[in-house]
């Protein structure tokens, strides 16, 4: 079956991440948050401006 190698890999990664110490989890989480912050503050508003018409944005800004 083709799904078996994928499931074995997924289970291995789940086991690996479930056995991490809290310090290691924190060291992985901080860079992810540092990368996510600019995406949320810069890219997301740019997408909203590009995808939503002016009328919809003006109604949303009143709310």
Image: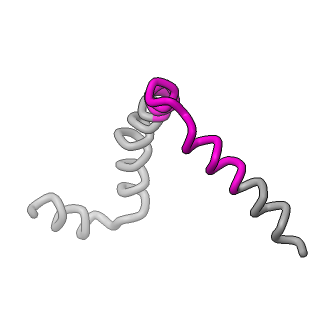
Nearest the viewer among 32 and 3 is 3
Taking the magenta stretch, the answer to whether it contains residue 4 is no
Q: Quadrant of residue 52?
A: bottom left
Q: Main secondary structure of the magenta part?
A: helix
Quarter of the picture holding the N terminus: bottom right
Is the residue 54 above or below the residue 20 in the image? below
Q: Residue at x 46, y 33 (%)?
A: 29
Is the residue 8 above or below the residue 12 in the image? below
Please provide percent x and percent y for residue 10: 70, 56
Q: Residue at x 72, y 49 (%)?
A: 12
Q: Is residue 52 left or right of residue 30?
A: left
Q: How many marks?
A: 0
Q: Residue at x 23, y 69 (%)?
A: 55
Q: Quadrant of residue 38?
A: top left
Please provide percent x and percent y for residue 27: 49, 24
Quarter of the picture holding the C terminus: bottom left
């Amino acid at each position: 079956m083709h799904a078996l190698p994928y499931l074995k890999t997924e289970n291995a990664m789940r086991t690996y991440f479930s056995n991490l110490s809290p310090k290691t989890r924190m060291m992985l989480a901080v860079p992810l948050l540092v990368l996510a912050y600019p995406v949320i503050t810069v890219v997301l508003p740019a997408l909203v401006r590009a995808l939503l018409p002016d009328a919809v944005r003006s109604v949303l800004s009143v709310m």
